[in-house]
Image (cartoon, rainbow, N blue to C red):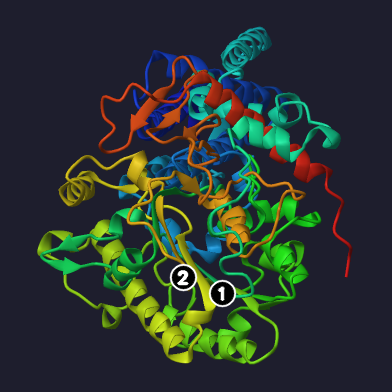
Amino acid sequence: MSLLIRLGNKRFTLFTLLLLFKCCLAWFVVFEDGPSMMTMLTEIPFFWLVFCMIEWFSKKRKLLYYTIANLLFTLLYFTVLMYYKYYGIIVTYHAISQADKVTKVGESTYSLMDPYYLLIFVDIVVLIGIQVWLRNKSKRIHINLKPISRTVLSSLFIVSIVLCFFSIWPNRASMNENKQAEGMGILNYEVYTIFADSTEDKAMVDMKDITQPVIDNLKGVTAVSNPQYFGAAKGKNVIIVQMESFQDFLIGLTIDGKEITPNLNKLAKENFNFDHFFTSVGQGTTSDAEYVVNTSLYVPKHEPATKNYVKKELPSLPKLLNAEGYHTATFHTNDVEFWNRKELYDAIGFDQYYDKSFFGDEDHVAFGASDEVLYSKTIEELKKMDESDQPFYAQILSMSSHHPYNIPEEKYQMELPEQFDDTLVGRYILSQNYSDYALGKFIDELKQSGLWDNSVFLLYGDHQGLPVYSLDSTEKGLMEEILGHEYGYTEMFNIPLILHAPGVTYPAEIKQTGGQIDILPTVANLMGISIANQIHFGQDLFNQTTSNVLPMRHFLPSGSIISDSSIFIPGIGFDDGKNYPFAGQEGNENGATVEQYEHALELLNLSDSYVKQLPDKAKK
């Protein structure tokens, strides 16, 4: 006896409905308005293009090919969900090409997953089970795949192409990538981005037209004849500490009367404290922060700076200090190959790097040796460097407080109220409290060794630690309780910058807006080094009191800028964009201007053009 199974158009319909459910789930998570009728008009035609080709070209095993297509679409939607939970944007092939990083930060990645996301794989498991069962029963079951007529297939294919085209074409001019994806449909957007790099980017600016006066004019930077603090720390050592995932709201924060960061609080009170300071990183996160701080150049649009930019002869802070007789070194407990740091350090001119091969893996926290090990071994190397006639520049990267903030309980330095238990916010605060503890011990050792009084010490956060997209309703409530207002973009991208310069009197309050892009020119001023002949996109925070506009990339849509009063995020363009005011600036009508928006886009294009035209670095 045989069983006749007729699928044909029913199979076509079944897989359309399955994938429509999955795309609606993705839309529900990543788009503010969720799925709509437009979802069907933008997503279904792409399914049909693939299904038509399966019907045309496969003579056998059509159900298998449908299942494979279903699996590939499902994996893409799942990747979109996971990526959005941390980055707040739609993943593209640029980020997928860096998928090898996921295996190295697996715990961080898996922590972002809501269990219900796995529902999108249920049908695939069932379908595979059915096909295995059919295969085992093949002697008793005859399968007749009823074909769809070629006329119907051709009509569906043409209609699908037309619908895909008219989804993509009107939306390609949008500055906001999330708006583009919503207008085009996620699948159409993924295809569009593959071709957009070569067709949509602004024309490259010729090198002779990229000058510091042009950059300064766009930024509103004015020349200062006698810059304040110029050379105030000339000849001193430079120690720069990059704090993992550290946000500014932690400075001065108390919970149940306990300070979260007592050592940083003290440091901020006794030294320069820039509390309106922001991250400038992109897809490369921590490594991008190293790049921006040491070059004063913007990160690339779609990829980490350590992918292609490090192939160039980059102007940098280490090279500036090398020319002044400094020895330069960087310290990080992870493997130097992660994020291609070996190439980064070579490109920006560090004389020496210390990585996992030096620090080992003792007292493991997150992805390497703990911050305590980092600082205890680093201080011994700094003492050795200080014994030579050369001053030194050392950049030190903390890492223990890395997402998802699962530090061992024996590292806890405080207890939090019960409502913080088993929350990302609670784990974040405990890990940063430990990082502050380890840093405090390091500062004590710097003071005891005499290095503190002979060194510029600068500390900043590398990037946001609590993405608003990752927080559930309970965690958002905890943040609102801590801050006294809703947690959003303005707190998420705000990181600390604290600077100690021996013998320099600091003002009581610094309200100047700044970003990581400004660290190189600020340090150069303190060290008495002119950078008039070195292209840089930051500004000296001691000597520019005019408005500072900071372009953002990757974590916010293209065209987003941080200004003195708000964070601006464009829509299709400037006119339908939205300002998110900083606390205390609500009701302030002085949001971003169209001139600031246009200048920010021009600055990004100048930076991209400049780096792409730099000579390739010499091979060693």
Q: Is residue 190 visible?
A: no
Disc marking residue 33? none
User: Which residue appears at 68% of the width and 47% of the height?
Assistant: 536
- Where is residue 565 shown, x and y percent of the image? 37, 33
Res 343 quadrant in image: bottom right
Q: Tell me the element at label 1.
A: loop
- Residue 81: image quadrant is top left
The disc at residue 399 is 2
Identify residue type, mark 2: Met
In the image, residue 563 sits, relative to residue 544, either above or below, namely: above
* 11 to 510, vertically: above or below: above
Looking at this view, is 78 or 467 the one in front?
A: 467
User: Badge 1 local density, few (<14 within 10 Å), some, or many (20+)?
Assistant: many
Neighbor class of circle 2 (other Cα within 10 Å; few <14, some 14-19, many 20+) is many
Residue 36 higher or lower than 264, as above or below = above
Amino acid under label 1?
His
Q: Is residue 434 left or right of residue 228?
A: left
Question: Secondary structure under badge 2?
Answer: loop
Q: Residue at x 51, y 84 (%)?
A: 451
Residue placed furthest toward the front: 226
Pick whichever, 64 or 449, lies toward us: 449
CB within 8 Å, label 1 to label 2: yes
* Residue behind mark 1: 332
Residue 422 x/y as whole percent:
21, 62
Query: Image quadrant for the C terminus?
Result: bottom right
Residue 171 in view (yes/no): yes
